[in-house]
Amino acid sequence: MSKHIPVKNRMSLGPRKKPTNEVTSGTLKIRKKFEENPELHEKYLKGLQVYYQKNKPQLSNKKAATRKRRILELMNMLDGKCDSCGEPYDPNVQPTNLQIHHLYYDEIDLQYLKRYRTHGETFRGVLRFAKNNDPKSKYRLLCKECHMMETAIKQDTHKFWHCLSWLIERKILDVNAIDTYRK
């Protein structure tokens, strides 16, 4: 059984408010109205809670469909296969077998990380970036294994080469396979 948080205690757990200089005049009017009349604000929040509970299955299905649509759109934009090993996108794997690799982080990415503390909406970010730019200039599609290797190389090159030489010495990894992989 889930524990329900009282409406008035839930406010601090929600998304952070934007500063007043970043919101529209309509939003400011609503904020002022709710500050003057907290009972109305509680009634509004309870109404949202009831609506969500009543329509939870439909909202969940809609969210899942939107996510699938975004992933397919993204895969089409970035060729739908791993840039390193060529593993194709598999729509039947949950979560997806391909991951987005940032070639660099710009100010917008860092603001998003600061605000939401996650890369969870990367699909949305890539699609937003792709409206005005070529997404291949900033992002790559990599399978999970290649993404881990790429990240390991970036974080600690010495450690990566040490691990690679250890694998070759113990004949876990074949040097000829590496040369074939490069071609």
Image: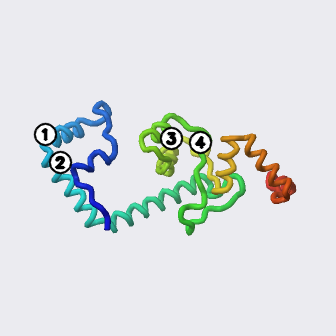
Across and down, in percent, residue 8 comes to 21, 49
Label number found at residue 138 = 4
Label number found at residue 132 = 3
Give whichever of 177, 68 is nearer the camera. Answer: 177
Q: Disc 4 or 1, which lies upstream in sequence?
A: 1
Could you tell whether 91 is left or right of 149 in the image? left
Q: Disc 4 or 3, which lies upstream in sequence?
A: 3
Colour scheme used in the picture? rainbow
Label number found at residue 161 = none
* Secondary element type, mark 1: helix
> Looking at the image, is mark 4 or mark 2 nearer the viewer?
2
* Secondary element type, mark 3: loop
Residue that badge 2 annotates: 41
How crowded pointer 3 is (Cα within 10 Å; few <14, some 14-19, many 20+) is rated as few
* Secondary element type, mark 2: helix
How crowded pointer 1 is (Cα within 10 Å; few <14, some 14-19, many 20+) is rated as few
Q: Disc 4 or 2, which lies upstream in sequence?
A: 2
Across and down, in percent, residue 62 comes to 38, 63
- Residue type at mark 1? Glu
> Looking at the image, is mark 4 or mark 3 nearer the viewer?
4
Separation (CA) of disc 1 from disc 2: 9 Å
Q: Residue at x 62, y 48 (%)?
A: 140
- The answer to whether the residue labelled 1 contacts the one labelled 2, judged by CB atoms less than 8 Å apart, is no
Across and down, in percent, residue 74 comes to 54, 54
Q: Residue at x 23, y 35 (%)?
A: 25
- The answer to whether the residue labelled 3 contacts the one labelled 1, judged by CB atoms less than 8 Å apart, is no
- Residue type at mark 4? Lys
Label number found at residue 36 = 1
How crowded pointer 4 is (Cα within 10 Å; few <14, some 14-19, many 20+) is rated as some
